[in-house]
């Protein structure tokens, strides 16, 4: 019941995961792509506007510098008073002044004739200063880039001031900002829509898997999800899910067999007990109550062993075999089992004991040896041999009987639950086909293994555990 509920929960979680993949992931991918593009575009737009503004100002500064150079050459040749700045300062946006050594304006562009000097800087001859002025004291409220150059003239040192209006650059930036403001949200909407659409295309195989998984139930795990031919992460997800479904199907089938076999094993002793009591109740005068009690007690003991084994396996499946780790002398356990077999069976029991110590659960390892020894005694004709020693750094215990042996094709199947190669004899002897399965489970929980060793006659089982 617990395993079936676990499989149902796993399928529900798988369906939920696929729904979230198709819905939430699609939206989150579109939102994430849009946010990333929005940040990149915002940074790029700001950088572009700043770079264009600087480029335009640099270009206008170069124009102003060229105008100043042209006037400087005139001042150097003709003097400040004999300079004509009209050709150099042609137009209202090009402003040029020549300042004499006494600080007066000796020449000026037509637009600023009679005005005061545009700036107060007076660099030495041969020096150039470039600056930005938000206003000029000539009635201009707009921004200018200003180039001031000192020059030596025949009539004394002078200063040439050339200014270019930045209004055209400012208007160009404003137009660019408006275009970016209009295009920015439109581009983001396109990115969001495209990302959502492309994510849907990429997740189309997942949608196909979701529809297939939606039709799979915990009781019918035969369906498999389609594997896309893309050989990408989605294809790997499909392969992984099919492998998971294979494991679930195998687990479900094993559970069904387990329940069916357990029901059969429990029904057999119960039927024997009921038949004994019904016969005794119908014919009390002809019943030998000592025999009836003996038969019933034997069946009750068989039931008790079966229930104990089933409980052990159920706990092992849920939490792993119980363990109380400590140092265990395997040779002592083998000696005790050899003595028990000699007392309880008519078999010849031979034990070869070498002192071997391992780390593990003494009670669990005792159960392993008892199950293996009981299995050997049940199948032996006359002799059981026990060996304990070391090999390759491992502790090795061997149990050998002279019975009919285990066919090669059955050497792995005998460790499955409720498997009996001679079902009639084992059932009569009280075996339920769980002893070897429990022994191997405990051995592997200790980091070792239990296997069948090929031999000419009889059965040869070998336990290997990590040595100390």
Image (cartoon, grey):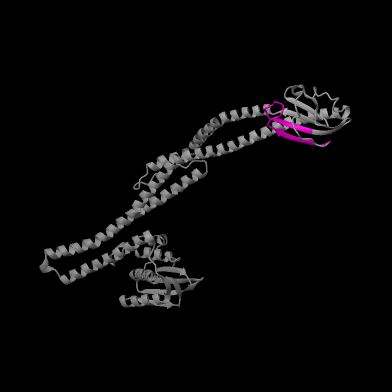
Q: How many marks overall?
A: 0
Residue 19 in magenta? Answer: no
Residue 232 placement (x, y as % from top left): 52, 43
Please indicate whether residue 259 sits to the left or right of residue 35 in the image.
left
Residue 422 seen in the figure:
no
Q: Is residue 208 visible?
A: yes
- Quarter assignment of residue 279: bottom left
Image point (77%, 27%), residue name: 96
Q: Position of residue 388 (x, y in %)?
A: 44, 74
Residue at image point 11% right, 67% down:
284
Would residue 104 appear left or right of 305 to someone viewing this image?
A: right
Magenta region: 125-148
Placement of the N terminus among the 4 image quadrants:
bottom left
Q: Residue at x 42, y 68 (%)?
A: 461
Q: Position of residue 325 (x, y in %)?
A: 42, 70
- Residue nearer the viewer, 10 or 180: 180
Q: Nearer the viewer, residue 293 or 245?
A: 245
Q: Horizontal placement of 156 versus 357: left or right? A: right
Expressed as whole percent of the image width and height from the top left, the position of residue 7 reads 37, 50
- Residue furthest to the left in view is 285
Residue at image point 21% right, 61% down: 271
């Amino acid at each position: 019941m617990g395993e079936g509920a676990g499989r149902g929960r796993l399928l529900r979680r798988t369906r939920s995961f696929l729904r979230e993949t198709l819905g939430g992931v699609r939206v989150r991918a579109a939102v994430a792509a849009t946010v990333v593009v929005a940040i990149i575009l915002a940074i790029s737009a700001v950088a572009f506007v700043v770079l264009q503004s600087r480029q335009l100002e640099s270009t206008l500064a170069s124009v102003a510098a060229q105008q100043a150079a042209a006037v400087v050459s005139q001042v150097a040749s003709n003097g400040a008073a004999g300079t004509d700045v009209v050709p150099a300062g042609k137009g209202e946006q090009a402003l040029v002044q020549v300042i004499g050594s006494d600080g007066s304006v000796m020449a000026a562009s037509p637009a600023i004739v009679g005005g005061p000097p545009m700036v107060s800087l007076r660099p030495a001859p041969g020096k150039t200063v470039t600056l930005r002025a938000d206003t000029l004291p000539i009635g201009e409220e707009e921004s200018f880039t200003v180039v001031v150059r000192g020059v030596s003239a025949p009539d004394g040192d002078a200063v040439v001031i050339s200014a270019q209006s930045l209004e055209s650059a400012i208007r160009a930036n404003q137009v660019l900002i408006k275009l970016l403001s209009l295009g920015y949200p439109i581009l983001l909407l396109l990115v969001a829509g495209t990302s959502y659409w492309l994510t849907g295309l990429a997740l189309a195989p997942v949608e196909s898997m979701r529809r297939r998984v939606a039709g799979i139930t915990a009781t019918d795990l035969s369906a498999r999800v389609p594997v896309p031919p893309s050989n990408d992460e989605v294809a790997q997800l499909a392969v992984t899910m099919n492998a998971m479904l294979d494991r679930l199907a195998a687990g479900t089938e094993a559970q069904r067999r387990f329940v069916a076999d357990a029901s059969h094993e429990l029904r057999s002793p119960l039927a024997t007990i009921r038949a004994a009591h019904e016969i005794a109740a119908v014919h009390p005068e002809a019943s030998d109550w000592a025999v009836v009690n003996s038969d019933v007690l034997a069946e009750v003991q068989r039931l008790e062993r079966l229930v104990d084994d089933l409980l052990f396996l159920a706990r092992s499946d849920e939490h792993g075999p119980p363990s109380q780790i400590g140092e265990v002398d395997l040779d002592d356990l083998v000696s005790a089992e050899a003595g028990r077999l000699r007392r309880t069976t008519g078999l010849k029991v031979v034990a070869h004991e070498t002192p071997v110590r391992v780390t593990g659960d003494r009670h669990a390892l005792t159960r392993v040896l008892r199950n293996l020894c009981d299995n050997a005694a049940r199948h032996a004709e006359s002799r059981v041999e026990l060996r304990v020693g070391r090999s390759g750094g491992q502790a090795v215990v061997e149990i050998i009987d002279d019975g009919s042996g285990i066919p090669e094709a059955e050497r792995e199947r005998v460790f499955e639950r409720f498997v009996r190669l001679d079902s009639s004899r084992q059932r009569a002897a009280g075996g339920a086909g769980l002893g070897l399965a429990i022994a191997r489970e405990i051995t592997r929980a200790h980091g070792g293994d239990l296997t069948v060793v090929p031999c000419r006659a009889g059965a040869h089982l070998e336990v290997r555990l990590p040595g100390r």
